[in-house]
Protein backbone atom coordinates (compact mmCIF):
# COMPACT_ATOMS: atom_id res chain seq x y z
CA UNK A 1 0.00 0.00 0.00
CA UNK A 2 1.34 3.40 -1.00
CA UNK A 3 1.90 6.04 1.68
CA UNK A 4 0.98 9.65 1.02
CA UNK A 5 1.69 12.66 3.23
CA UNK A 6 -1.22 14.33 5.03
CA UNK A 7 -0.97 17.98 6.11
CA UNK A 8 -3.67 19.61 8.22
CA UNK A 9 -3.40 23.38 8.51
CA UNK A 10 -5.70 25.77 10.31
CA UNK A 11 -6.86 29.14 9.03
CA UNK A 12 -4.17 30.69 6.84
CA UNK A 13 -3.58 33.82 4.81
CA UNK A 14 -4.97 33.43 1.29
CA UNK A 15 -1.72 34.13 -0.55
CA UNK A 16 0.11 31.75 1.78
CA UNK A 17 -2.36 28.97 1.03
CA UNK A 18 -1.75 29.36 -2.69
CA UNK A 19 2.02 29.65 -2.28
CA UNK A 20 2.12 26.45 -0.23
CA UNK A 21 0.05 24.52 -2.76
CA UNK A 22 2.38 25.67 -5.53
CA UNK A 23 5.50 24.83 -3.47
CA UNK A 24 4.23 21.30 -2.77
CA UNK A 25 3.64 20.77 -6.49
CA UNK A 26 7.15 21.96 -7.37
CA UNK A 27 8.64 19.71 -4.71
CA UNK A 28 6.75 16.69 -6.01
CA UNK A 29 7.80 17.42 -9.60
CA UNK A 30 11.40 17.48 -8.40
CA UNK A 31 10.95 14.08 -6.74
CA UNK A 32 11.67 15.51 -3.30
CA UNK A 33 8.36 14.75 -1.56
CA UNK A 34 5.66 12.07 -1.66
CA UNK A 35 2.15 12.64 -2.98
CA UNK A 36 0.36 14.92 -0.55
CA UNK A 37 -3.18 15.63 0.61
CA UNK A 38 -3.48 18.96 2.43
CA UNK A 39 -6.55 20.47 4.13
CA UNK A 40 -6.85 24.07 5.31
CA UNK A 41 -9.13 27.07 5.53
CA UNK A 42 -8.90 30.87 5.44
CA UNK A 43 -7.93 33.57 7.93
CA UNK A 44 -10.44 36.02 6.43
CA UNK A 45 -12.92 35.60 3.56
CA UNK A 46 -10.76 35.31 0.46
CA UNK A 47 -11.45 35.53 -3.25
CA UNK A 48 -9.28 33.30 -5.42
CA UNK A 49 -9.10 34.02 -9.13
CA UNK A 50 -8.17 31.40 -11.69
CA UNK A 51 -4.71 31.52 -13.17
CA UNK A 52 -5.82 33.31 -16.35
CA UNK A 53 -8.92 35.08 -15.03
CA UNK A 54 -9.29 38.85 -15.37
CA UNK A 55 -9.36 40.91 -12.17
CA UNK A 56 -12.19 42.83 -13.84
CA UNK A 57 -14.46 39.93 -12.89
CA UNK A 58 -14.17 41.10 -9.27
CA UNK A 59 -15.32 44.27 -7.53
CA UNK A 60 -12.03 45.10 -5.83
CA UNK A 61 -13.47 48.14 -4.07
CA UNK A 62 -16.18 45.99 -2.49
CA UNK A 63 -13.58 43.42 -1.41
CA UNK A 64 -11.44 46.12 0.19
CA UNK A 65 -14.45 47.60 1.97
CA UNK A 66 -15.40 44.19 3.37
CA UNK A 67 -11.84 43.25 4.34
CA UNK A 68 -11.70 40.34 1.88
CA UNK A 69 -8.36 39.18 0.53
CA UNK A 70 -8.06 38.65 -3.23
CA UNK A 71 -5.40 36.25 -4.50
CA UNK A 72 -4.38 34.49 -7.69
CA UNK A 73 -4.59 30.69 -7.86
CA UNK A 74 -1.92 28.59 -9.56
CA UNK A 75 -4.78 26.56 -11.09
CA UNK A 76 -7.30 27.50 -13.75
CA UNK A 77 -11.03 28.02 -13.51
CA UNK A 78 -13.13 30.91 -12.30
CA UNK A 79 -13.40 32.91 -9.12
CA UNK A 80 -14.37 31.55 -5.72
CA UNK A 81 -15.22 33.36 -2.49
CA UNK A 82 -13.80 31.15 0.27
CA UNK A 83 -15.25 31.62 3.72
CA UNK A 84 -17.09 29.01 5.79
CA UNK A 85 -15.50 25.90 4.31
CA UNK A 86 -12.77 23.30 4.39
CA UNK A 87 -10.43 23.45 1.40
CA UNK A 88 -8.43 20.49 0.17
CA UNK A 89 -5.45 20.29 -2.15
CA UNK A 90 -3.93 17.13 -3.55
CA UNK A 91 -0.58 16.80 -5.32
CA UNK A 92 0.25 13.51 -6.97
CA UNK A 93 1.43 12.16 -10.28
CA UNK A 94 1.32 9.36 -12.79
CA UNK A 95 4.04 7.54 -10.87
CA UNK A 96 1.65 7.48 -7.90
CA UNK A 97 -1.10 5.83 -9.91
CA UNK A 98 -2.96 8.86 -11.23
CA UNK A 99 -4.11 8.61 -14.84
CA UNK A 100 -2.59 11.22 -17.15
CA UNK A 101 -4.96 13.87 -18.36
CA UNK A 102 -7.50 16.25 -16.92
CA UNK A 103 -10.69 14.25 -17.39
CA UNK A 104 -9.38 10.92 -16.12
CA UNK A 105 -7.60 12.42 -13.10
CA UNK A 106 -10.64 14.53 -12.19
CA UNK A 107 -12.80 11.41 -12.31
CA UNK A 108 -10.52 9.53 -9.93
CA UNK A 109 -9.89 12.33 -7.43
CA UNK A 110 -13.45 13.68 -7.46
CA UNK A 111 -14.64 10.15 -6.86
CA UNK A 112 -12.81 10.31 -3.53
CA UNK A 113 -14.49 13.64 -2.78
CA UNK A 114 -17.91 12.16 -3.54
CA UNK A 115 -17.12 9.35 -1.10
CA UNK A 116 -16.34 11.95 1.57
CA UNK A 117 -19.63 13.74 0.97
CA UNK A 118 -21.58 10.51 1.15
CA UNK A 119 -19.92 9.59 4.45
CA UNK A 120 -21.20 12.92 5.79
CA UNK A 121 -24.71 12.02 4.67
CA UNK A 122 -24.78 14.01 1.42
CA UNK A 123 -25.54 12.02 -1.75
CA UNK A 124 -23.07 13.89 -3.94
CA UNK A 125 -22.37 12.75 -7.47
CA UNK A 126 -19.90 13.66 -10.19
CA UNK A 127 -22.43 14.50 -12.87
CA UNK A 128 -22.70 16.25 -16.19
CA UNK A 129 -24.66 19.35 -15.22
CA UNK A 130 -26.14 22.00 -17.49
CA UNK A 131 -23.59 24.35 -18.96
CA UNK A 132 -24.29 27.07 -16.44
CA UNK A 133 -23.67 30.78 -16.92
CA UNK A 134 -20.76 31.11 -19.33
CA UNK A 135 -20.50 34.85 -18.73
CA UNK A 136 -20.22 34.70 -14.95
CA UNK A 137 -16.86 35.13 -13.26
CA UNK A 138 -18.06 33.08 -10.30
CA UNK A 139 -17.06 29.42 -10.31
CA UNK A 140 -20.30 28.34 -8.68
CA UNK A 141 -22.37 29.59 -11.63
CA UNK A 142 -20.17 27.73 -14.11
CA UNK A 143 -20.47 24.03 -14.93
CA UNK A 144 -17.39 21.83 -15.43
CA UNK A 145 -16.70 18.08 -15.64
CA UNK A 146 -15.21 18.33 -12.12
CA UNK A 147 -18.42 19.47 -10.44
CA UNK A 148 -19.86 17.56 -7.53
CA UNK A 149 -23.60 18.04 -7.48
CA UNK A 150 -26.58 17.48 -5.27
CA UNK A 151 -29.31 16.94 -7.81
CA UNK A 152 -29.15 19.94 -10.14
CA UNK A 153 -27.28 22.12 -7.62
CA UNK A 154 -23.51 22.52 -7.57
CA UNK A 155 -21.91 21.46 -4.28
CA UNK A 156 -18.31 22.11 -5.23
CA UNK A 157 -15.93 22.50 -8.10
CA UNK A 158 -12.26 21.65 -8.41
CA UNK A 159 -9.41 23.17 -10.39
CA UNK A 160 -6.16 21.65 -11.65
CA UNK A 161 -2.77 22.48 -13.03
CA UNK A 162 -0.40 19.87 -14.47
CA UNK A 163 3.37 20.23 -14.45
CA UNK A 164 5.26 17.45 -16.20
CA UNK A 165 3.73 14.26 -14.78
CA UNK A 166 2.39 15.80 -11.55
CA UNK A 167 -0.87 17.56 -10.85
CA UNK A 168 -2.19 19.98 -8.25
CA UNK A 169 -5.95 19.83 -7.72
CA UNK A 170 -7.83 21.79 -5.11
CA UNK A 171 -11.40 22.63 -4.19
CA UNK A 172 -13.79 23.23 -1.29
CA UNK A 173 -16.29 21.63 1.04
CA UNK A 174 -18.62 24.59 1.63
CA UNK A 175 -20.37 24.59 4.99
CA UNK A 176 -22.46 27.73 4.33
CA UNK A 177 -22.50 30.48 1.72
CA UNK A 178 -23.14 34.24 1.87
CA UNK A 179 -24.80 34.55 -1.55
CA UNK A 180 -25.25 38.32 -1.24
CA UNK A 181 -21.54 38.86 -0.66
CA UNK A 182 -20.62 36.44 -3.45
CA UNK A 183 -22.95 38.19 -5.90
CA UNK A 184 -21.39 41.54 -5.02
CA UNK A 185 -17.82 40.24 -5.31
CA UNK A 186 -18.40 38.92 -8.82
CA UNK A 187 -20.58 41.80 -10.07
CA UNK A 188 -23.51 39.49 -10.76
CA UNK A 189 -26.03 42.32 -10.74
CA UNK A 190 -29.73 42.19 -10.02
CA UNK A 191 -30.85 38.66 -9.34
CA UNK A 192 -27.30 37.39 -8.78
CA UNK A 193 -27.99 36.29 -5.22
CA UNK A 194 -31.04 34.37 -6.35
CA UNK A 195 -29.11 32.64 -9.12
CA UNK A 196 -26.50 31.52 -6.65
CA UNK A 197 -29.11 30.38 -4.16
CA UNK A 198 -30.97 28.38 -6.80
CA UNK A 199 -27.95 26.86 -8.51
CA UNK A 200 -25.73 25.90 -5.58
CA UNK A 201 -25.86 23.79 -2.43
CA UNK A 202 -23.86 23.68 0.78
CA UNK A 203 -23.47 21.18 3.59
CA UNK A 204 -25.96 23.23 5.59
CA UNK A 205 -28.46 23.09 2.73
CA UNK A 206 -28.07 19.33 2.46
CA UNK A 207 -28.03 18.44 6.15
CA UNK A 208 -29.81 21.28 7.94
CA UNK A 209 -26.77 21.84 10.14
CA UNK A 210 -23.23 21.76 8.78
CA UNK A 211 -20.81 19.28 10.35
CA UNK A 212 -17.83 20.76 12.16
CA UNK A 213 -14.58 21.26 10.29
CA UNK A 214 -12.92 18.36 12.10
CA UNK A 215 -15.70 16.03 10.94
CA UNK A 216 -15.28 17.19 7.36
CA UNK A 217 -11.51 16.74 7.53
CA UNK A 218 -11.87 13.23 8.96
CA UNK A 219 -14.31 12.34 6.18
CA UNK A 220 -11.92 13.63 3.50
CA UNK A 221 -9.00 11.74 4.97
CA UNK A 222 -10.89 8.47 5.27
CA UNK A 223 -12.36 8.82 1.78
CA UNK A 224 -9.02 9.32 0.09
CA UNK A 225 -7.56 6.32 1.86
CA UNK A 226 -10.45 4.04 0.95
CA UNK A 227 -11.10 5.33 -2.58
CA UNK A 228 -7.45 5.40 -3.67
CA UNK A 229 -6.21 2.45 -1.62
CA UNK A 230 -3.52 4.49 0.11
CA UNK A 231 -2.35 5.20 3.64
CA UNK A 232 -2.08 8.82 4.77
CA UNK A 233 0.70 9.64 7.19
CA UNK A 234 0.86 12.99 9.02
CA UNK A 235 3.83 15.08 7.96
CA UNK A 236 4.88 18.75 7.87
CA UNK A 237 6.07 20.85 4.99
CA UNK A 238 9.75 20.37 4.30
CA UNK A 239 12.14 23.26 4.93
CA UNK A 240 12.58 23.62 1.16
CA UNK A 241 8.81 23.82 0.58
CA UNK A 242 8.45 26.45 3.29
CA UNK A 243 11.29 28.53 1.85
CA UNK A 244 9.76 28.27 -1.62
CA UNK A 245 6.36 29.40 -0.32
CA UNK A 246 7.90 32.30 1.58
CA UNK A 247 9.78 33.44 -1.52
CA UNK A 248 6.71 33.38 -3.77
CA UNK A 249 3.84 34.39 -1.47
CA UNK A 250 3.66 38.05 -2.48
CA UNK A 251 3.25 37.07 -6.12
CA UNK A 252 -0.14 35.51 -5.38
CA UNK A 253 -1.53 38.53 -3.52
CA UNK A 254 -3.83 40.96 -5.36
CA UNK A 255 -5.72 42.69 -2.52
CA UNK A 256 -5.24 42.32 1.24
Image (cartoon, rainbow, N blue to C red):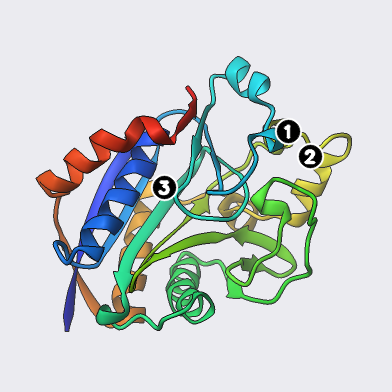
Task: Give the percent coordinates (x, y) of residue 2.
Answer: 18, 80
Task: Give the percent coordinates (x, y) of residue 93.
Answer: 31, 74
Q: Residue furthest left?
A: 239
Residue drawn at x 48%, y 72% is: 110
Residue drawn at x 51%, y 40% is: 84
Element carrying mark 2: helix
| Labels 3 and 2: the sequence-earlier one | 2
Asked if the residue at tag 1 contacts the one at tag 2, i.e. Cβ–Cβ closer than 8 Å, the answer is yes
Figure check: 68 above or below 154: above
Residue drawn at x 47%, y 77% is: 111
For residue 193, the mark is 2
Figure check: 207 above or below 253: below
What distance separates the C-alpha of mark 2 from that of mark 1? 5 Å
**Disc 1 target residue:** 180
Figure check: 205 above or below 81: below
Q: Is residue 100 left or right of residue 64?
A: left
Element carrying mark 1: helix
Q: Residue furthest right?
A: 190
Task: Give the percent coordinates (x, y) of residue 212.
Answer: 41, 47
Quadrant the N terminus occupies = bottom left
Q: Is residue 179 left or right of residue 214?
A: right
What distance separates the C-alpha of mark 3 from that of mark 2? 25 Å
Task: Give the percent coordinates (x, y) of residue 40.
Answer: 35, 46
Amino acid sequence: MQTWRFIQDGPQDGAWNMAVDRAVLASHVAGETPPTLRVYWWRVPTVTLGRFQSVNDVDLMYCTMRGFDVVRRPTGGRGVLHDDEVTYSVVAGTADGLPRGVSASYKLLCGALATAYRSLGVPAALTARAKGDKGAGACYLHATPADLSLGAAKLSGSAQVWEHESVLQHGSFVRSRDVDAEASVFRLGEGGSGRLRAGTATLTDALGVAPGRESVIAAVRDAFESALGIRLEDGPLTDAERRSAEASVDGFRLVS
